[in-house]
Image (cartoon, grey):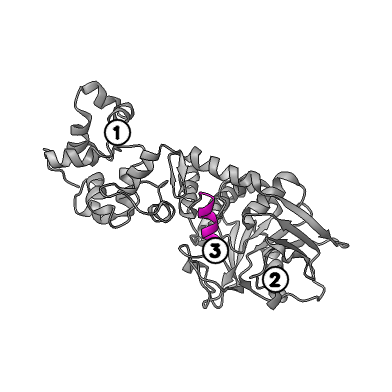
Amino acid sequence: MTNSLMSSGFERDLASRLFNAGWYLSENPDVARSGLDPLTHYLERGAWEWRNPHPLFDSQWYLGQYPEVATAGRNPLLHYLTDGVSALNDPHPLFDTRTYLRMCGRIPTGMTPLELFLASERPALAGAYRSIEALQEMQQAFLDRVTVEIFSDHRKRPARWAVFLQCGRPSLHEQWLTATPKPWHLIANFYDDTYQRPLPADMVLVQNQGTKFTGVYRLLKDRPEFFQPYDYILFLDDDILVTEDQVTRLFEVVQALSLKLAQPAVKPESAYTWPVLLEQRGSIGRYLNTVEIMMPVISRDALSVGAYLFGRSISGWGLDFALGQTVSRAFGRGQAGVIDAVSFLHSKAIDTDEGHYYGMLRSHGLSALVEERAIRLCYGAQGPIELEQDETADE
């Protein structure tokens, strides 16, 4: 990136819309000591040193998200104000422009979405949060409203494994679930009023609101012993197509490999996000740094060390990354993997714009994208990434 050394009056007027001089000086005491005008310093030097002009404009992150800006030698703040706003670029990891615009409607002429949010003086709105703490307060308010009640419990025999199945009116479980005896307990967690339908489940739970992850959070908080009887638990979304034999085979392979965290491979005809999770023929399984959250198999040990993470993401976005990193730190690398010997079908495409799930999150002031970014900020976690064989030795 190169600068023009001398800023123009136009650039000063433009940048001043989002430049916080007092904050800039407090964050850069060398500038304060120099006696230089903070805006002049930012325009002529600070931007090229990745200094931030405002608490909600992250220069280095912006250039990482939109590398063409760095390639063109543009000042990130000026680019945002002249071109980025119309392109719906995000100025900061805690600001999801698309979600914010869906919730606030029209932006007054001459304002940016970020300026509109700042003018509100609110700590958080759907897609926009002044700090990690503001996001966490929004998340905690949601979690505090979640309840999970036991409707029925027919477990008469012990089992080493359990399937925690998210159930409701659109759930696909009726296409694969039978009354045949199984070597695992089925725990059906209902999110609507269909829980009174006949179902070959060992236990039926009723959740008043929320997601699979918030239901697990509530159980771990209120009944910390709930999952302790099981070596492994498969947490299954409601849009997964599978067979009972495949579920049993998955547990057998994961147990034989002694993994702490695993998932079945994703059938190639599935809706998917991460190509590394697609089924690879001829492979039993591969080591990863984490697995996706739509159908993870989590060991009792991994659930114990990662229990606190279920309160960090209502949507589940980013939770898988952080859980994989926590497992690696606790037990060493090579403890997570995708099982190619067993593959499940994820039937529904992810629709973050019109999907009911994401609309529900927005109505509670939450952005899945920001939750994932916050996980990255807090834990530095990422994934899933396939590990080379020599990377799987315990550290």
Q: Is residue 358 left or right of residue 217?
A: left
Q: CA distance from mark 1 to mark 3?
A: 38 Å
Residue with the mark numbered 3: 356
The numbered mark, 2 or 3, whose residue comes first in the sequence reads 2
Q: Is residue 135 left or right of residue 76?
A: right
Residue at image coords 70%, 50%: 147
Residue 124 percent across, percent down from the top left: 46, 42
Residue 14 percent across, percent down from the top left: 20, 42
Determine if residue 68 is in view: yes
Determine whether the residue tagged by mark 3 lies in a helix, strand or loop: helix
Q: Was residue 362 drawn as part of the magenta stretch in this picture?
A: yes
The reply to whether dot 2 and dot 1 touch (C-beta < 8 Å) is no
Residue 205 percent across, percent down from the top left: 75, 58
Determine whether the residue tagged by mark 2 lies in a helix, strand or loop: helix
Q: CA distance from mark 2 to mark 1?
A: 55 Å
| Rendered image quadrant of residue 293 | bottom right
Residue at image coords 74%, 45%: 222
Determine if residue 318 is in view: no
The numbered mark, 2 or 1, whose residue comes first in the sequence reads 1
279 vs 327: above or below: below
Residue with the mark numbered 2: 247
Q: What is the span of residues highlighted in magenta in the rendered image?
A: 356-365
Question: Callout 3 environment at 10 Å: few (<14), some (14 to 19), or many (20+)?
Answer: few
Residue with the mark numbered 1: 20
Residue 95 percent across, percent down from the top left: 40, 48
